[in-house]
Amino acid sequence: MWAEGGGTVRVDGRHHRVWGAHAGPAPAHDVGIWLGAYKRRMLDMTGRLADGWLPSHAYAALDALPAMNAIIDEAALGAGRSPADVRRLYNIAGTFTGSGRGFLQGPAGVWAEQLAELTLEQGMSAYILASDDPDDIRRFAAEVVPGVRELVDAGRAGSGAPAAEDRPRPAETGAEAGGRGASPATTTGSAPVTVTPARTGGGVPALGFLPTPDDGTRLADVQVWDESTRPTGPAPDPARTYTPGEQAAGRHLVDVHDHLRQELAEVRRLVEEVTSGAMDPGLARSHINTMTMRQNNWTVGVYCESYCRVVTTHHTIEDQTLFPRLRRADPRLVPVVDRLEQEHHAIHEVLEGVDRALVAFVAEPDGHKALRAAMDLLTDTLLSHLSYEERELVEPLARLGLH
Protein backbone atom coordinates (compact mmCIF):
# COMPACT_ATOMS: atom_id res chain seq x y z
CA MET A 1 0.00 0.00 0.00
CA TRP A 2 2.91 2.33 0.72
CA ALA A 3 4.66 1.71 -2.57
CA GLU A 4 4.93 4.82 -4.71
CA GLY A 5 1.87 4.93 -6.93
CA GLY A 6 0.48 1.84 -5.18
CA GLY A 7 -3.09 2.62 -6.13
CA THR A 8 -6.07 0.73 -4.72
CA VAL A 9 -5.57 -2.52 -2.81
CA ARG A 10 -7.86 -5.54 -3.14
CA VAL A 11 -7.09 -8.79 -1.32
CA ASP A 12 -9.47 -11.73 -1.22
CA GLY A 13 -7.67 -13.65 1.52
CA ARG A 14 -8.46 -16.84 3.39
CA HIS A 15 -8.88 -15.11 6.75
CA HIS A 16 -9.04 -11.41 5.92
CA ARG A 17 -10.36 -9.45 2.97
CA VAL A 18 -9.45 -5.95 1.82
CA TRP A 19 -11.63 -4.55 -0.92
CA GLY A 20 -10.84 -1.14 -2.30
CA ALA A 21 -8.44 0.31 0.32
CA HIS A 22 -6.61 3.39 -0.92
CA ALA A 23 -2.89 3.78 -0.24
CA GLY A 24 -1.23 6.76 1.38
CA PRO A 25 0.19 8.85 2.67
CA ALA A 26 3.56 7.20 2.13
CA PRO A 27 5.95 7.30 5.13
CA ALA A 28 8.92 9.64 4.99
CA HIS A 29 11.32 6.80 5.82
CA ASP A 30 11.44 3.04 6.07
CA VAL A 31 9.30 1.71 8.91
CA GLY A 32 11.24 -0.87 10.88
CA ILE A 33 9.71 -3.77 12.77
CA TRP A 34 10.79 -4.32 16.39
CA LEU A 35 9.90 -7.57 18.13
CA GLY A 36 9.40 -7.96 21.88
CA ALA A 37 10.52 -11.59 21.76
CA TYR A 38 11.57 -13.81 24.68
CA LYS A 39 11.48 -17.46 23.68
CA ARG A 40 13.83 -19.19 21.32
CA ARG A 41 11.64 -19.44 18.22
CA MET A 42 10.77 -15.75 18.28
CA LEU A 43 14.33 -14.73 19.17
CA ASP A 44 15.49 -16.71 16.16
CA MET A 45 12.95 -14.89 14.00
CA THR A 46 14.18 -11.58 15.43
CA GLY A 47 17.72 -12.33 14.32
CA ARG A 48 16.65 -13.48 10.85
CA LEU A 49 14.07 -10.83 10.01
CA ALA A 50 13.52 -8.01 12.51
CA ASP A 51 14.98 -4.53 12.53
CA GLY A 52 15.08 -4.35 16.31
CA TRP A 53 14.63 -6.27 19.54
CA LEU A 54 12.58 -4.55 22.25
CA PRO A 55 12.33 -6.65 25.45
CA SER A 56 11.18 -5.38 28.84
CA HIS A 57 13.21 -5.75 32.01
CA ALA A 58 10.22 -7.29 33.79
CA TYR A 59 10.30 -10.25 31.37
CA ALA A 60 13.96 -10.28 30.30
CA ALA A 61 16.07 -9.79 33.44
CA LEU A 62 19.68 -8.71 33.28
CA ASP A 63 21.05 -12.22 33.70
CA ALA A 64 18.89 -13.48 30.81
CA LEU A 65 20.06 -10.89 28.27
CA PRO A 66 23.38 -12.52 27.26
CA ALA A 67 21.77 -15.82 26.22
CA MET A 68 18.94 -14.05 24.38
CA ASN A 69 21.36 -11.77 22.57
CA ALA A 70 23.46 -14.77 21.57
CA ILE A 71 20.45 -16.47 19.95
CA ILE A 72 19.64 -13.32 17.98
CA ASP A 73 23.27 -12.90 16.89
CA GLU A 74 23.53 -16.53 15.79
CA ALA A 75 20.27 -16.34 13.83
CA ALA A 76 21.33 -13.10 12.14
CA LEU A 77 24.64 -14.59 11.03
CA GLY A 78 22.88 -17.73 9.81
CA ALA A 79 20.61 -15.57 7.67
CA GLY A 80 23.55 -13.72 6.13
CA ARG A 81 22.96 -10.61 8.22
CA SER A 82 25.18 -8.76 10.64
CA PRO A 83 24.08 -8.82 14.31
CA ALA A 84 24.37 -5.03 14.10
CA ASP A 85 21.35 -5.08 11.76
CA VAL A 86 19.18 -5.84 14.80
CA ARG A 87 18.96 -2.86 17.07
CA ARG A 88 18.76 -3.60 20.83
CA LEU A 89 16.36 -1.57 22.96
CA TYR A 90 15.15 -2.06 26.54
CA ASN A 91 11.97 -1.08 28.36
CA ILE A 92 12.92 -0.07 31.89
CA ALA A 93 11.35 1.14 35.12
CA GLY A 94 12.80 2.11 38.48
CA THR A 95 12.84 4.56 41.35
CA PHE A 96 15.14 7.42 42.27
CA THR A 97 14.42 7.05 45.97
CA GLY A 98 16.04 3.64 46.49
CA SER A 99 19.32 2.89 48.23
CA GLY A 100 21.13 1.64 45.12
CA ARG A 101 20.78 -2.02 46.08
CA GLY A 102 19.05 -3.15 42.92
CA PHE A 103 18.71 -2.36 39.24
CA LEU A 104 17.61 1.27 38.79
CA GLN A 105 16.85 1.61 42.50
CA GLY A 106 18.75 4.70 43.59
CA PRO A 107 20.01 8.14 42.58
CA ALA A 108 20.46 9.20 38.98
CA GLY A 109 24.18 8.42 39.09
CA VAL A 110 23.41 4.78 39.84
CA TRP A 111 20.98 4.65 36.92
CA ALA A 112 23.62 6.11 34.61
CA GLU A 113 26.28 3.60 35.68
CA GLN A 114 23.98 0.61 35.27
CA LEU A 115 22.59 1.66 31.89
CA ALA A 116 26.08 2.41 30.63
CA GLU A 117 27.08 -1.11 31.68
CA LEU A 118 24.24 -2.51 29.58
CA THR A 119 25.45 -0.48 26.63
CA LEU A 120 28.94 -1.89 27.07
CA GLU A 121 28.11 -5.50 27.83
CA GLN A 122 24.94 -6.12 25.83
CA GLY A 123 24.97 -3.45 23.13
CA MET A 124 21.68 -1.86 24.15
CA SER A 125 21.36 1.45 22.33
CA ALA A 126 18.07 2.88 23.63
CA TYR A 127 16.26 2.82 26.95
CA ILE A 128 12.53 3.50 27.14
CA LEU A 129 11.35 4.66 30.57
CA ALA A 130 8.00 3.18 31.59
CA SER A 131 6.69 5.99 33.77
CA ASP A 132 4.03 8.66 33.78
CA ASP A 133 5.54 10.52 36.74
CA PRO A 134 6.60 13.99 35.53
CA ASP A 135 9.43 14.23 38.08
CA ASP A 136 10.86 10.85 37.09
CA ILE A 137 10.69 11.77 33.41
CA ARG A 138 12.46 15.08 34.06
CA ARG A 139 15.20 13.43 36.10
CA PHE A 140 15.65 10.75 33.47
CA ALA A 141 16.05 13.36 30.73
CA ALA A 142 18.09 15.91 32.69
CA GLU A 143 20.35 13.67 34.80
CA VAL A 144 20.36 10.04 33.68
CA VAL A 145 20.67 10.48 29.92
CA PRO A 146 23.59 12.94 30.07
CA GLY A 147 25.24 10.74 32.69
CA VAL A 148 25.02 7.67 30.48
CA ARG A 149 26.46 9.59 27.56
CA GLU A 150 29.39 10.79 29.68
CA LEU A 151 30.10 7.26 30.87
CA VAL A 152 30.01 5.70 27.43
CA ASP A 153 32.09 8.51 25.94
CA ALA A 154 34.70 8.03 28.64
CA GLY A 155 34.63 4.27 28.22
CA ARG A 156 34.89 4.56 24.46
CA ALA A 157 37.86 6.90 24.78
CA GLY A 158 39.49 4.62 27.31
CA SER A 159 39.08 1.49 25.19
CA GLY A 160 40.15 3.16 21.95
CA ALA A 161 37.16 1.57 20.19
CA PRO A 162 34.42 3.63 18.56
CA ALA A 163 31.63 1.34 19.74
CA ALA A 164 30.73 -2.29 20.23
CA GLU A 165 31.61 -4.09 17.02
CA ASP A 166 28.64 -6.42 16.88
CA ARG A 167 25.86 -4.10 18.00
CA PRO A 168 23.88 -1.35 16.28
CA ARG A 169 24.91 2.26 16.59
CA PRO A 170 22.69 4.57 18.65
CA ALA A 171 20.19 6.86 17.00
CA GLU A 172 20.04 10.49 18.04
CA THR A 173 17.23 10.67 20.59
CA GLY A 174 17.30 11.87 24.17
CA ALA A 175 16.90 8.49 25.84
CA GLU A 176 19.61 6.70 23.92
CA ALA A 177 23.28 5.94 24.47
CA GLY A 178 25.99 4.07 22.64
CA GLY A 179 29.51 2.87 23.24
CA ARG A 180 31.14 1.55 26.38
CA GLY A 181 30.46 2.45 29.98
CA ALA A 182 30.92 1.59 33.63
CA SER A 183 29.95 -1.33 35.78
CA PRO A 184 26.91 -1.40 37.99
CA ALA A 185 27.53 -1.41 41.69
CA THR A 186 25.82 -3.67 44.18
CA THR A 187 24.91 -2.81 47.74
CA THR A 188 23.67 -5.09 50.49
CA GLY A 189 23.68 -5.08 54.27
CA SER A 190 24.76 -2.47 56.80
CA ALA A 191 28.07 -0.76 57.49
CA PRO A 192 30.49 -1.25 60.41
CA VAL A 193 31.77 2.32 60.14
CA THR A 194 29.88 5.53 59.56
CA VAL A 195 30.80 6.85 56.13
CA THR A 196 27.98 9.35 55.60
CA PRO A 197 28.10 11.95 58.40
CA ALA A 198 25.18 14.29 59.01
CA ARG A 199 25.15 17.26 56.68
CA THR A 200 26.24 20.06 58.98
CA GLY A 201 28.79 22.82 58.69
CA GLY A 202 29.56 25.16 55.82
CA GLY A 203 27.68 25.35 52.57
CA VAL A 204 25.30 27.42 50.48
CA PRO A 205 21.85 27.54 52.13
CA ALA A 206 20.20 28.70 48.90
CA LEU A 207 21.03 25.31 47.37
CA GLY A 208 18.63 23.61 49.77
CA PHE A 209 21.28 21.16 51.04
CA LEU A 210 24.83 21.12 52.36
CA PRO A 211 27.90 19.21 51.17
CA THR A 212 28.89 16.20 53.24
CA PRO A 213 31.47 17.35 55.82
CA ASP A 214 34.66 15.55 56.67
CA ASP A 215 34.28 14.37 60.27
CA GLY A 216 38.07 14.12 60.70
CA THR A 217 38.14 10.39 61.45
CA ARG A 218 41.31 8.69 60.19
CA LEU A 219 41.91 4.94 60.38
CA ALA A 220 45.36 4.56 58.78
CA ASP A 221 48.73 5.53 60.22
CA VAL A 222 49.80 7.34 57.04
CA GLN A 223 48.38 10.04 54.78
CA VAL A 224 48.95 10.29 51.05
CA TRP A 225 48.63 14.08 50.86
CA ASP A 226 48.72 17.23 52.97
CA GLU A 227 45.13 18.38 53.39
CA SER A 228 46.22 21.80 54.64
CA THR A 229 47.51 22.70 51.16
CA ARG A 230 44.17 22.25 49.41
CA PRO A 231 43.14 25.40 47.53
CA THR A 232 39.65 26.87 47.73
CA GLY A 233 37.50 28.27 44.97
CA PRO A 234 35.57 31.52 44.72
CA ALA A 235 33.17 32.35 47.54
CA PRO A 236 29.49 31.94 46.54
CA ASP A 237 27.39 35.03 46.01
CA PRO A 238 25.19 35.22 49.15
CA ALA A 239 22.46 37.03 47.22
CA ARG A 240 22.18 34.44 44.47
CA THR A 241 19.18 32.13 44.25
CA TYR A 242 19.09 28.79 42.46
CA THR A 243 16.32 27.25 40.41
CA PRO A 244 15.18 23.68 41.17
CA GLY A 245 17.12 22.51 38.12
CA GLU A 246 20.29 24.24 39.33
CA GLN A 247 19.84 22.77 42.79
CA ALA A 248 19.49 19.31 41.23
CA ALA A 249 22.77 19.79 39.34
CA GLY A 250 24.60 20.46 42.57
CA ARG A 251 22.83 17.65 44.37
CA HIS A 252 23.79 15.20 41.63
CA LEU A 253 27.42 15.15 42.77
CA VAL A 254 26.36 14.46 46.36
CA ASP A 255 24.07 11.63 45.23
CA VAL A 256 26.88 9.94 43.30
CA HIS A 257 29.26 10.36 46.22
CA ASP A 258 26.69 9.00 48.68
CA HIS A 259 26.47 5.88 46.58
CA LEU A 260 30.26 5.51 46.65
CA ARG A 261 30.19 5.93 50.44
CA GLN A 262 27.48 3.29 50.82
CA GLU A 263 29.40 0.87 48.64
CA LEU A 264 32.60 1.50 50.58
CA ALA A 265 30.80 0.76 53.83
CA GLU A 266 29.52 -2.52 52.41
CA VAL A 267 32.95 -3.58 51.17
CA ARG A 268 34.43 -2.76 54.57
CA ARG A 269 31.74 -4.81 56.30
CA LEU A 270 32.46 -7.79 54.09
CA VAL A 271 36.22 -7.50 54.60
CA GLU A 272 35.72 -7.28 58.35
CA GLU A 273 33.52 -10.38 58.45
CA VAL A 274 35.80 -12.52 56.32
CA THR A 275 39.09 -11.41 57.84
CA SER A 276 37.69 -11.96 61.33
CA GLY A 277 36.90 -15.55 60.35
CA ALA A 278 40.37 -15.97 58.87
CA MET A 279 41.91 -15.10 62.25
CA ASP A 280 39.94 -17.79 64.13
CA PRO A 281 41.90 -21.08 63.98
CA GLY A 282 38.82 -23.01 65.01
CA LEU A 283 37.12 -22.23 61.72
CA ALA A 284 39.81 -24.09 59.77
CA ARG A 285 39.54 -27.44 61.53
CA SER A 286 37.44 -29.12 58.89
CA HIS A 287 37.69 -29.44 55.14
CA ILE A 288 34.24 -27.88 54.71
CA ASN A 289 35.20 -24.81 56.71
CA THR A 290 38.44 -24.51 54.77
CA MET A 291 36.50 -24.52 51.51
CA THR A 292 34.04 -21.96 52.89
CA MET A 293 36.84 -19.64 53.95
CA ARG A 294 38.47 -19.92 50.53
CA GLN A 295 35.17 -19.08 48.83
CA ASN A 296 34.68 -16.09 51.14
CA ASN A 297 38.17 -14.87 50.30
CA TRP A 298 37.37 -14.88 46.61
CA THR A 299 34.06 -13.13 47.31
CA VAL A 300 35.93 -10.34 49.06
CA GLY A 301 38.23 -10.08 46.05
CA VAL A 302 35.34 -9.75 43.62
CA TYR A 303 33.62 -7.06 45.70
CA CYS A 304 36.81 -5.06 46.21
CA GLU A 305 37.83 -5.22 42.56
CA SER A 306 34.34 -4.21 41.44
CA TYR A 307 34.33 -1.25 43.81
CA CYS A 308 37.80 -0.14 42.73
CA ARG A 309 36.62 -0.25 39.11
CA VAL A 310 33.59 1.94 39.91
CA VAL A 311 35.77 4.53 41.67
CA THR A 312 38.24 4.57 38.78
CA THR A 313 35.44 5.05 36.24
CA HIS A 314 33.93 7.91 38.24
CA HIS A 315 37.29 9.68 38.40
CA THR A 316 37.94 9.07 34.70
CA ILE A 317 34.63 10.72 33.80
CA GLU A 318 35.47 13.74 35.92
CA ASP A 319 39.00 14.04 34.52
CA GLN A 320 37.92 13.76 30.89
CA THR A 321 34.62 15.66 30.84
CA LEU A 322 33.71 17.56 34.01
CA PHE A 323 37.05 19.09 35.00
CA PRO A 324 37.99 20.49 31.55
CA ARG A 325 34.57 22.13 31.29
CA LEU A 326 34.84 23.71 34.76
CA ARG A 327 38.29 25.07 33.91
CA ARG A 328 36.88 26.74 30.80
CA ALA A 329 33.69 27.98 32.45
CA ASP A 330 35.31 29.60 35.50
CA PRO A 331 39.12 30.10 35.54
CA ARG A 332 38.93 30.79 39.29
CA LEU A 333 38.27 27.05 39.75
CA VAL A 334 41.51 25.98 38.03
CA PRO A 335 43.59 25.52 41.24
CA VAL A 336 40.81 23.46 42.85
CA VAL A 337 40.26 21.30 39.77
CA ASP A 338 44.00 20.75 39.36
CA ARG A 339 44.25 19.60 42.98
CA LEU A 340 41.26 17.28 42.63
CA GLU A 341 42.84 15.73 39.56
CA GLN A 342 46.12 15.24 41.46
CA GLU A 343 44.20 13.52 44.24
CA HIS A 344 42.61 11.20 41.67
CA HIS A 345 46.11 10.00 40.75
CA ALA A 346 46.96 9.50 44.41
CA ILE A 347 43.77 7.53 45.01
CA HIS A 348 44.62 5.40 41.99
CA GLU A 349 47.85 4.42 43.72
CA VAL A 350 45.88 3.56 46.85
CA LEU A 351 43.57 1.37 44.75
CA GLU A 352 46.64 -0.37 43.35
CA GLY A 353 47.65 -1.05 46.94
CA VAL A 354 44.25 -2.62 47.60
CA ASP A 355 44.78 -4.86 44.58
CA ARG A 356 48.18 -5.99 45.89
CA ALA A 357 46.68 -6.60 49.32
CA LEU A 358 43.98 -8.79 47.79
CA VAL A 359 46.65 -10.96 46.18
CA ALA A 360 48.40 -11.30 49.53
CA PHE A 361 45.10 -12.01 51.26
CA VAL A 362 44.38 -15.13 49.22
CA ALA A 363 48.01 -16.29 49.06
CA GLU A 364 49.56 -15.58 52.47
CA PRO A 365 48.54 -16.75 55.96
CA ASP A 366 48.56 -13.26 57.48
CA GLY A 367 47.33 -11.50 54.34
CA HIS A 368 44.28 -10.20 56.21
CA LYS A 369 46.49 -7.63 57.97
CA ALA A 370 47.63 -6.06 54.71
CA LEU A 371 44.07 -6.03 53.35
CA ARG A 372 42.70 -4.29 56.43
CA ALA A 373 45.47 -1.70 56.29
CA ALA A 374 44.85 -1.08 52.58
CA MET A 375 41.11 -0.67 53.15
CA ASP A 376 41.73 1.76 56.02
CA LEU A 377 43.95 3.89 53.79
CA LEU A 378 41.39 3.80 50.97
CA THR A 379 38.65 4.84 53.41
CA ASP A 380 40.67 7.78 54.71
CA THR A 381 41.72 9.10 51.30
CA LEU A 382 38.45 8.56 49.45
CA LEU A 383 36.12 10.01 52.11
CA SER A 384 38.39 13.00 52.59
CA HIS A 385 38.53 13.57 48.84
CA LEU A 386 34.77 13.26 48.34
CA SER A 387 34.06 15.80 51.08
CA TYR A 388 36.61 18.25 49.67
CA GLU A 389 35.21 17.91 46.16
CA GLU A 390 31.65 18.51 47.35
CA ARG A 391 32.71 21.53 49.41
CA GLU A 392 34.32 23.15 46.37
CA LEU A 393 32.15 22.01 43.45
CA VAL A 394 28.49 21.69 44.43
CA GLU A 395 27.92 25.45 44.12
CA PRO A 396 29.83 25.82 40.82
CA LEU A 397 27.91 22.86 39.39
CA ALA A 398 24.64 24.50 40.37
CA ARG A 399 25.78 27.83 38.95
CA LEU A 400 27.41 26.51 35.75
CA GLY A 401 25.40 23.32 35.15
CA LEU A 402 26.50 19.74 34.74
CA HIS A 403 26.98 19.95 30.95
Image (spheres, grey):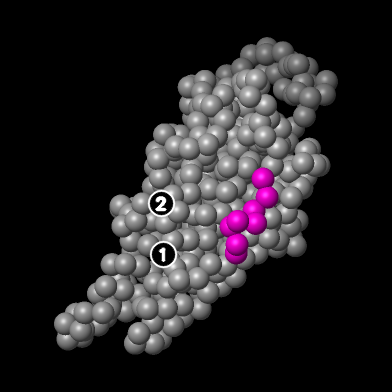
Question: Residue 25: x and y, percent?
Answer: 76, 16
Q: Gap between marks 2 and 1, in whole Å?
A: 12 Å
Q: Quadrant of the C terminus?
A: top right
In the image, taking residue 28 as reference, residue 309 lies left or right, namely left
Residue 219, numbered label: 1
The residue closer to the viewer here, 393 or 362, is 393
Question: Residue 218: x and y, percent?
Answer: 44, 61
Question: Residue 245: x and y, percent?
Answer: 61, 25
- The amino acid at mark 1 is Leu
Residue 195, numbered label: 2
SS state under label 2: loop
Q: Residues within 10 Å of mark 1 (few under 14, many from 20)?
A: some
Identify which residue is drawn at 82% across, 24% down: 4
Identify which residue is drawn at 78% across, 38% down: 330
- The answer to which quarter of the image holds residue 243 is top right
SS state under label 1: loop
Residue 331, numbered label: none
Residue 90 visible, this orientation: no
Residue 370 is a magenta residue: no
The residue closer to the viewer here, 296 or 268, is 268
- The answer to which quarter of the image holds residue 141 is top right
Q: Which residues are magenta?
A: 225-232
The residue closer to the viewer here, 132 or 68, is 132
Instruction: Name the dominant secondary structure of the magenta segment.
Output: loop
Q: Residues within 10 Å of mark 2 (few under 14, many from 20)?
A: many
Front tag of 2 and 1? 1
Q: Is residue 364 above or below residue 341?
A: below
Identify which residue is drawn at 59% across, 34% down: 250
Mark 2 / mark 1, whichever is N-terminal: 2
In the image, taking residue 336 as reference, residue 277 lies left or right, namely left
Q: Quadrant of the N terminus?
A: top right
